[in-house]
Image (cartoon, coloured by chain):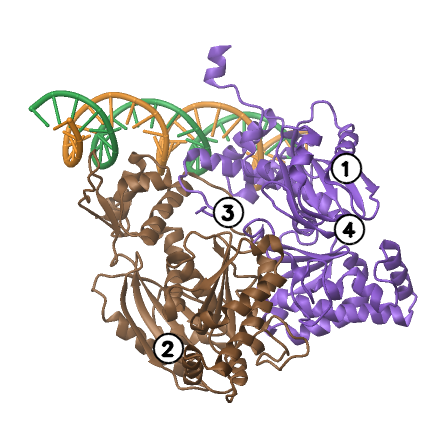
Chain colours: A purple, B brown, C orange, D green
Amino acid sequence: MSMGRDELGHRSETVRRANLSAIVRELHGSGPLSRSDLVARTGLTRSAIRGLIGELVTGGMAIEGPATLDGTPGRPSPLVRPDPDGAVVLALEIAVDSLAAATVGLGGRVFDNVRVELPRGRSSVADIAAELAELAATVRGSLSVDSTIVGVGVAVVGVVRRSDGMVALAPNLGWRDEPLGEHLRRALGMSVPIMFANESDLAALAEHRRGVARGVDDVVVIWGSVGVGGGLIVDGHPLTGAAGYSGEVGHIPVNPDGLPCRCGSIGCWETEVGTSALLRRAGQPPEGGHDAVDAILRDAEAGEPTALAAFSETGRWLGIGLAGVINVLNPDLVLLGGRLASSYPFVRSTLEAELDRRVLRASRGLVRVIPTSLGEDAPLLGAAELAFGPLLTDPAAWLRPRRTMVALASA
Amino acid sequence: MSMGRDELGHRSETVRRANLSAIVRELHGSGPLSRSDLVARTGLTRSAIRGLIGELVTGGMAIEGPATLDGTPGRPSPLVRPDPDGAVVLALEIAVDSLAAATVGLGGRVFDNVRVELPRGRSSVADIAAELAELAATVRGSLSVDSTIVGVGVAVVGVVRRSDGMVALAPNLGWRDEPLGEHLRRALGMSVPIMFANESDLAALAEHRRGVARGVDDVVVIWGSVGVGGGLIVDGHPLTGAAGYSGEVGHIPVNPDGLPCRCGSIGCWETEVGTSALLRRAGQPPEGGHDAVDAILRDAEAGEPTALAAFSETGRWLGIGLAGVINVLNPDLVLLGGRLASSYPFVRSTLEAELDRRVLRASRGLVRVIPTSLGEDAPLLGAAELAFGPLLTDPAAWLRPRRTMVALASA
DNA sequence: GCACATTTGAGAAAGAGGAACACAAACCTC
DNA sequence: GAGGTTTGTGTTCCTCTTTCTCAAATGTGC
């Protein structure tokens, strides 16, 4: 019986929160802006902006600097920048064959970013949590002493519950119903909230905030690692579903009499467009890893016919599955990411041909299919954005408290 | 570059609008409520509620009546009811083989409701628009003279653009890129806004507002008429997509080497779960209509094996396609509506079996699949809800204007 | 170099809207 | 009928934005 996105019972404080949130979002998303830019973007008056900026500056979340003179007449407007030290998040990622960590400041500045190889096969949740905690300690070393970490975001290759980081399924790691959240909370020993999501969902969030999908309200990201996942942005907001399990496009049935899938089903999209399908079509053993795929890519670049045919057939199946997704969601933009980004040139033509045939004409004309723009780190950057979420929604809760009547009285 | 659902630049007027909206939504959705109920539901103070209710009453949108004594101590709280005459919408529907119209008051009271048969096959847009206008005139006759029509909602069997009612595709009617919006606007000759949407989308809206999906935030409605459409509620809001073409689940490819579809593609879900597939499996000519399907239903109820087998196989394919939808959207609830509602008992077991096999375990446990609750009129009721949308968002814009200083001065 | 238009910041006052509080009214129970 | 409880009423207060006026800082044209 939740109210969805809207909350009832507004008051004047709600207005201030919404306006502060709007300003912090603009600063976080667009970087330094003059006060008058903010007036134009928010529609608030100069006086209101002044008061709100003042609160952000004294709260340590923004810095006012000298104006940049652009040659136009009129009094110059001072530049407001997000204070990267004012609010920092820790981003973590459990990818297919690597672990990563980064510290990211308000405004999107990446302070430090490390990635380590992960040996193939099973690893215990406790081991992974411990290793992530070590990476976290490393990247935290690059922060100045007065930075405040306001949250932790974690990207996971697998089906993870958003509320508590319970991993329902992560075939690459051999996990099933593993309480990653609990382990990580203990290993990190931090008091700030830790938020979890699937790598594809976070790649979508990152592309929407800082990549080619900026300003686009309906976006689908198809993220290929070993399997295939999807991140959905709908009406400008991430689509999470009832428990955060949405976007599992890899397990759409596309071939009812197809091959068995790691999830237990048969004929999932993943069995036709995942790494193993590509390797199979290229005449390689399907359990080959990253290197084997790279080899096929190089062959394709060199014009080798078997490799080209393997990509071409994969593209056909990409188109078949994607047509269903597009017909259901009617997006403006579809981004191919992860391994699929590098495959893009070689799958493009057969993919588009299937879309031409299978997507309803009305939707077909509106949708573009292109590669992602942020590369391999998109899920990690998305994890940072996830962790910034609460702060962007209600910045006032994170500002260094203003002196209040009570505080003065008790002093 | 839209802002999505959120708007920037809040002010105190925003608060009043949001609070009025919250109250009108509660009244519209839940019917008569005492003032103290509203206090509890909105979290506002008694003073605030009083002021807002007062505005609604003088604006003619609500009526305050005597309290209902329920035996509890304390001063009784007067009952606030939505004034059904205060705001009325006109709902229209173009279904597969019928046209319908209704007048619906604030609070959901249906004043009048008519449905006429539509001869099978092509009809020109102008003819349909004219006939709808006639039906509209009929149902408007049942309104009291001082009722204000605040909007028109139109449900269409087909792919329709929300912004202007351009019908991209409606195979049942033989339409392709027909400007229904323009024709209807002329035929009705009304100055209020006319809004359009697909029948499945509106069935979902109706079930979410007034049916079994009330209070459920993530809902999928699969609506079977001749083809199959889908209505999606995500995070408590209808999912429209970039242009309103979302939810076309009937055209998800499920059988890459399947039968040709009316949309031009092959192997669409619709070709396996639509009416013609059922008729084919029951050994009937696939172009049979409503009556032929009803005959198979009666046979199945009588235990006739061919009919049962036809439903069973249809259920299997229903499960295959639905598994993909569930894996992508992670809904709490899936509703089968239209023709599929009556089929439900006979497709249930094979459908659930496919879901067990093909839906990720994490999502599977959360989702219930049941029939719709509002019957055949769900799209029509949804059209009414669609038309109420602007009023629910900003009731103040529709209140009879308060006496202002200017009005007094000019009097 | 200087008047002038232009844009923006600063500060005070006003306006809008809900919260808080005190009090009265209307119900219940005993 | 006294006492407890819940709720409507009315007033005052608080928060936050807008509005208005003035000053400051820039560019332009002579």
- Judging by the rendered image, the residue that carries numbered circle 3 is B7
Are both tags, 1 and 2, on one chain? no
Identify the element where label 1 is drawn: helix
Choose mark 3 or mark 2, whichever is in front: 2
Q: Where does residue B199 sit, x and y in percent of width and height?
A: 45, 69
Numbered tag placed on residue A195 in the rendering: none
Identify the element where label 2 is drawn: strand
Choose mark 4 or mark 1, whichever is in front: 1
Identify the residue at image location x=57%, y=65%: B353
Q: CA distance from mark 4 to mark 1?
A: 27 Å
Q: Residues within 10 Å of mark 4 (few under 14, many from 20)?
A: some
Using the image as rendered, state which of residue A288 and residue B380 is in the foreground: A288
Are both tags, 4 and 3, on one chain? no
Q: From this view, report whether residue B46 is shown above or below residue A162.
A: above
- Judging by the rendered image, the residue that carries numbered circle 2 is B99
Are both tags, 3 and 1, on one chain? no
